[in-house]
Amino acid sequence: MNNCLLMMGGSGTRLGTQIPKQYIEVDGVPIFAYILDKLNKFDAIDNIVIVSNPAWIDYVEDWKQKLGANKVKAVVAGGATRSESVLNGLKVTSEFANDDDVILIHDATHPYVDEAGTLGVIEGVKRYGGATLGEYQYDTCYRIDENNFIVQVENRRELVAGASPEAFFFGDIYRIYSSVTTEELETMTSAGAIALAHGIKMVVVPCNIINLKITYKNDFDAFLKTVHSYFFE
């Protein structure tokens, strides 16, 4: 089976809004609900666990019902850090997942579902043990210093921007998250970073759509202009 953690436990303070960005309503629908609805209708996904900001669990449950999101097995509270939130989601998933299941981790700050890319990620896990969607770089890439001065031109062919989802065999990633130190959970912000540190080989699958991540206001403005014409037609 293919299981998905929909990660939306953060506070989203950098956007400067009064509520976490994943819960902002666009045309009467919160951002996470666009993603959840598409994941729920995606044939390749069998089960979904939502990792929510603790203060918004009831709101998420209401929208789960409105959408008829029958693939959602649980809505669980996120932790103090991103990695702790992932661990919380994995613990719940362990109640029904097998070790050789694929677990996809999709961040709600990436407001899209790249179906073709996600299928590629699932196949990547089966071949290599780990995979992630990624956006290749086509512009010149610079390394800068703390004062924003260019110090080096990087080889763009060796750089990709991480996208959602990342994916692994469930048993592999759950064992790692269950055994690492609290310090490691606090310092490594992505499942990919933890997986690589513990010997899981990961392949990058090219993203088939714009890899938008909502962090600042201009990102949110771009989503507003494209939500119905591009990301969720």
Image (cartoon, rainbow, N blue to C red):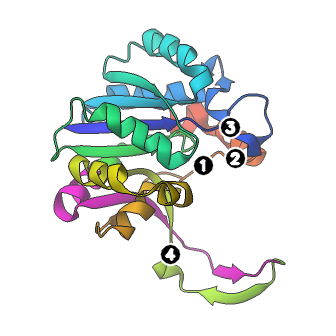
Query: In which quarter of the view is residue 55 placed?
Result: top right
Q: Earlier in the sequence, mark 4 or mark 1?
A: 4
Q: Earlier in the sequence, mark 3 or mark 4?
A: 4
Asked whether 10 or 184 is in front, the reply is: 184
Q: Which residue is mark 1?
A: 213
- Distance of label 2 from label 1 (alpha carbons): 7 Å
Count residues near mark 3 (Cα–Cα under 10 Å), then give few for <14, some for 14-19, many for 20+. Answer: few
Q: Which residue is mark 4?
A: 159
Asked whether 126 or 185 is in front, the reply is: 185
Q: Which residue is mark 2?
A: 219
- Distance of label 3 from label 4 (alpha carbons): 28 Å
Could you tell whether 216 is left or right of 177 in the image?
Answer: right
Picture layout, residue 90 above or below residue 125: above
- Amino acid carrying label 3: it is Lys
Residue in the image at 67% along x and 37% along y:
11
Span shown in magenta: 120-146
Residue at the far bottom: name it.
152
Could you tell whether 203 is left or right of 37 in the image?
Answer: left
Residue in the image at 30% along x and 53% along y:
173
Give how far across and how far down residue 109 sits, in percent: 58, 42
- Distance of label 2 from label 4 (alpha carbons): 21 Å
Q: Which residue is mark 3?
A: 225
